[in-house]
Image: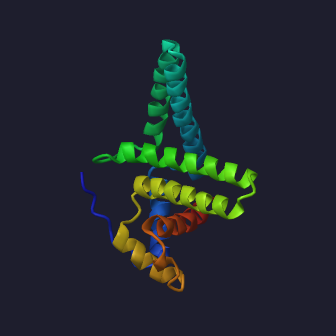
């Protein structure tokens, strides 16, 4: 299923498109962000149940894992209603990787390694932003370049990777959409 997206010529068009999607799908980005954090934790619980089952040899952990996985799948459907290819799996892994980087960053911060923590937090947020961009279907790479030109980034974001640039735009869009 391929959706033809209208070209975005400036940041205002990008914000209007996000607002239109919000109204059309009755999106509540604040609640949806909370749901993504819950999903991250459910994915983490699945991982812990797997390792507990493997380490103890107790099948009860695997039974619980199945139950948690079923809840996670049900909740993920609330955010990912229409997808193609492997977007479902990519989305799940983006959330999982984002959470893991956040946790490693927090441990680095506790150990006094502030620069390392900051780098990990930035990577975590970039992956989280990719999740939103992928699932809101706001724009593609060409549209990111056009939108960046209109944001007045002074060319600094052009030096960053796709995920970081995407994160900057998603942050600005989400901030514009909060009521």
- Residue 150: x percent and y percent? 48, 82
Q: Residue at x 67, y 64 (%)?
A: 115
Q: Residue at x 51, y 13 (%)?
A: 58
The residue nearer to you, when weighing 144 against 92, is 92
Q: Residue at x 28, y 47 (%)?
A: 85
> For this view, does 144 lie left or right of residue 164?
left
Q: Residue at x 45, y 31 (%)?
A: 74
The residue nearer to you, when weighing 46 against 29, is 46
> For this view, does 136 lie left or right of residue 64?
left
- Residue 119: x percent and y percent? 60, 63
> Can residue 28 be seen in this snapshot?
no
> Can residue 33 be seen in this snapshot?
yes
- Residue 174: x percent and y percent? 56, 61
Position of 87 relative to 42 (above/below): below
Position of 152 relative to 167 (above/below): below
Q: Please count the marks in the image.
A: 0
The residue nearer to you, when weighing 143 against 119, is 119
């Amino acid at each position: 299923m391929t959706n033809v997206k209208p070209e975005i010529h400036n940041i205002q068009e990008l914000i209007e498109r996000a607002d239109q999607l919000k109204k059309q799908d009755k999106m509540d980005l604040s609640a949806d962000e909370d749901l993504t954090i819950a999903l991250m934790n459910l994915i983490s619980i699945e991982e812990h149940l797997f390792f507990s089952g493997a380490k103890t040899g107790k099948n009860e952990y695997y039974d619980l894992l199945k139950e948690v996985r079923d809840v996670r799948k049900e909740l993920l459907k609330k955010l990912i209603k229409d997808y193609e290819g492997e977007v479902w799996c990519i989305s799940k892994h983006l959330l999982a990787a984002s959470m893991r980087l956040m946790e490693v960053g927090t441990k680095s911060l506790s150990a006094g390694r502030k620069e390392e923590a900051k780098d990990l937090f930035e990577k975590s947020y970039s992956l989280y932003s990719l999740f939103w961009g992928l699932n809101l279907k706001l724009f593609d790479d060409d549209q990111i370049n056009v939108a960046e030109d209109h944001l007045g980034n002074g060319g600094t974001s052009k030096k960053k990777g796709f995920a970081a640039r995407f994160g900057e735009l998603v942050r600005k869009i989400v901030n514009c959409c909060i009521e």
